[in-house]
Amino acid sequence: MQATRRAQWSWAFYDWANSAFATTVLAGFFPIFFNQYWAAGVDPQTQTFYQGLTSTVASLIVMLLSPWLGAIADRRGRKKQFLGVFTLIGVATTAALFLVGKGQWGWAIGLSILARIGFFGGLSFYDALLVNVARPEQMDRVSALGYGMGYLGGGLLFTVNVAMALKPEWFGLADAAIATRVAFLSVAFWWLLFSLPLFRNVPGGEPREGATGWAELVETFRHIRSLRPVWMFLLAYWLYIDGVDTIIVMAVDFGMKLGFASDSLIKALLMVQFIGFPAAIAFGWLGDRLGTRRAIFVALAVYAAVTVWAYSMQTQTQFYLMAAAIGCVQGGIQSLSRSYYARLIPPERAGEFFGFYNMMGKFAAVLGPTVVGVTATVTGNPRLAILSLLLFFAAGALLLVQVKDPLRRTD
């Protein structure tokens, strides 16, 4: 049992490790630094296009590779080795951003695409290792532990990085530009260092017989089609996580459209990180007590209420309260969705099945922002655009009703 706990904590520390990339690089510094430093002098519309292209190219590559590589990893018993390759790609290219000088936007784009591939491409194998460290009845708590550690670890380093950028002299740095470049280097070091326990203590799984490569991918797709709870859950997850991800991606833009100061929006982002740590852990407990599916419904109800609230929001204080409410459920809905899915799939094929799971997550990065953007353009009302996300939460909940948890006959 002691070895199992060690493996579970080691697995969770990978979330602590790679979440620094999500907070400091993806959500925090890269968008601002790209516009103000790497692409300085490029017109704003082109800057936006380049950043969108960076995200789209990386997402497309990961979306195409994840199910195929997951099948190969399962066949050869190499989930941990594949995760190691993607981790090294992410760490090396994030560190290399330190070397990119002012005006070198081409290098920044290329390295960012590779770093995103390392980050997102590794998630399928990391998620799939959940079945190697937790029994089905433990999955809610262990998955929640991972997300909780991610919020705490990512938030801690992001706090230090923000302080470096605002007060570089405190750290012996010349200016904010140097501080930001050092921040990218710190993320790479953090990611590498705290990944080590997983590679040392988490079992990697055994190889199995069967088809390989694309043949096995086709077989997996057919297998998913034959498992109604799995494909119903994937459809439900695609819809409701689309709404969740859209709120994450567009919350800052929404706040800016309402005239809130950028420093206030960064504070709100930090607040979500630190609230997300205990809240994600609490949702693991809630999943055990209430049932995983019911706990997901609780989170969806909070998201729907926040969406309605955002329609009439007027003050910056209300924005902070809304951010706090999101922080209470964001990690919970992500962690319980992962553990719920892990119980629905064959454990020996977790790599390829989680490849499809994360592929749906990549699809979810497209539809929601598009609907919000089109609604805002047509109506000229950003509040009404946010309200359109209610459709995603409602449709996802309706599909989820039809998916039963194998651990709970009445859930």
Image: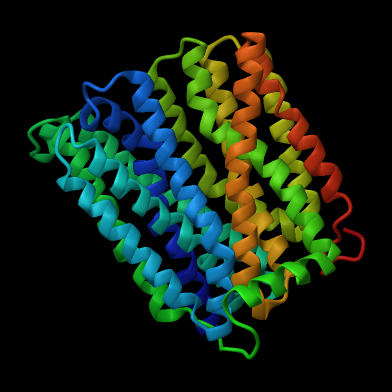
Asked whether 48 or 329 is in front, the reply is: 48
Going by the picture, which residue comes out furthest to the bottom? 209
Count the marks: 0
Picture coordinates of residue 207 (x, y %)?
56, 88
Instruction: Examine the image and state in which quarter residue 44 appears.
Output: top left
Picture coordinates of residue 351 (x, y %)?
59, 72
Is 247 positioned to the left or the right of 405 in the image? left
**Residue 336 visible in the shown view:** yes
Tell me what residue is drawn at x 65 percent, y 40 percent: 242
Picture coordinates of residue 374 (x, y %)?
63, 21
Query: Could you tell me which quadrant the C terminus lies in?
Result: bottom right
Picture coordinates of residue 328 (x, y %)?
61, 40
Instruction: Examine the image and state in which quarter residue 177 appears.
Output: top left
Is 105 positioned to the left or the right of 53 in the image? left
Q: Is residue 211 above or below residue 291?
A: below
Asked whether 309 or 287 is in front, the reply is: 309
